[in-house]
């Protein structure tokens, strides 16, 4: 299972400070709720875009529960689950900044992200619609995005809250955000 945590560093600082080493285990297992049961289980590696037009590799901390044997990984909130481009750039692109230093190098990917968001937001069964204040429902993805910003303030906070409360991101639903799913 993947938990998303806000950290006081961006991707470059996370790497240069080896910040992953200071991430501690959650107090209780998110699968079985046992307390003080999570033990370090190394890292997995994933790619993420940096401040400049570069792709970085970060180490993501993992833990295993000694009671239920399931795993938990701690994804920094600056990263979007299953997406290469960092949340800051996605947010700026969705807000219409499509040619600045943050977004221009990744425009092809960001256009795909926007299409995925349009597809996901148009689904009438999208559980997270209820988290946004609206009446009647917006007609366009652009208006949905405005509501996301009004409600949460940023792509980072929206992702963190929706994953935690509804087990979805702004791009879909993933097994790794559900407690008791086998993958960790
Ligand atoms: Zn457990």
Image (spheres, helix red, strand yellow):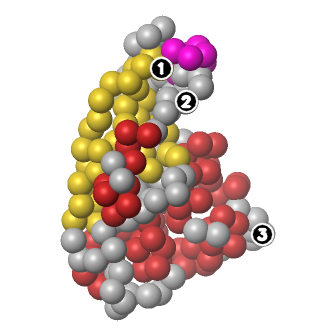
Q: Earlier in the sequence, mark 2 or mark 3?
A: 2
Labels 1 and 2 touching (C-beta < 8 A): yes
The percent coordinates of residue 36 (x first, y second) are: 56, 17
The percent coordinates of residue 8 (x first, y second) are: 52, 57
Q: Earlier in the sequence, mark 1 or mark 2?
A: 2
Residue under label 3:
135
Point out the image quarter for the N terminus: top left
Specify few, some or many for label 3: CA neighbours under 10 Å numbering under 14, 14-19, or 20 or more.
Answer: few
Residue under label 2:
26
The percent coordinates of residue 178 (x first, y second) are: 50, 32
Q: Which residues are magenta?
A: 31-37
Residue furthest bottom as drawn: 99
Residue under label 1:
38
Q: Secondary structure at mark 3?
A: loop
Q: Is mark 1 within 8 Å of ligand 1?
A: yes
Specify few, some or many for label 1: CA neighbours under 10 Å numbering under 14, 14-19, or 20 or more.
Answer: many
């Amino acid at each position: 299972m993947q938990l998303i945590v806000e950290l006081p560093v961006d991707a470059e600082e996370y790497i240069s400070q080896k910040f992953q080493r200071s991430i501690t285990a959650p107090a209780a297992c998110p699968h079985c709720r046992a307390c003080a049961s999570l033990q370090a289980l190394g890292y997995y590696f994933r790619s993420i875009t940096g401040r400049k037009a570069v792709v970085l590799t970060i180490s993501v901390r993992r833990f295993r529960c000694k009671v239920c044997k399931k795993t938990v990984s701690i994804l920094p909130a600056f990263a979007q689950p299953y997406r290469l481009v960092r949340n800051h750039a996605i947010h700026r692109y969705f807000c219409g900044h499509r040619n600045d230093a943050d977004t221009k190098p990744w425009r092809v990917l960001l256009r795909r992200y926007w299409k995925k968001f349009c597809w996901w937001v148009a689904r009438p069964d999208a559980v997270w619609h209820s988290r946004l204040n609206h009446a009647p429902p917006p007609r366009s993805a652009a208006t949905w995005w405005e509501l996301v910003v009004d409600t949460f303030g940023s792509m980072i906070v929206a992702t963190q809250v929706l994953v935690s409360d509804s087990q979805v991101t702004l791009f879909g639903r993933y097994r790794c955000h559900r407690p008791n799913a086998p993958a960790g």
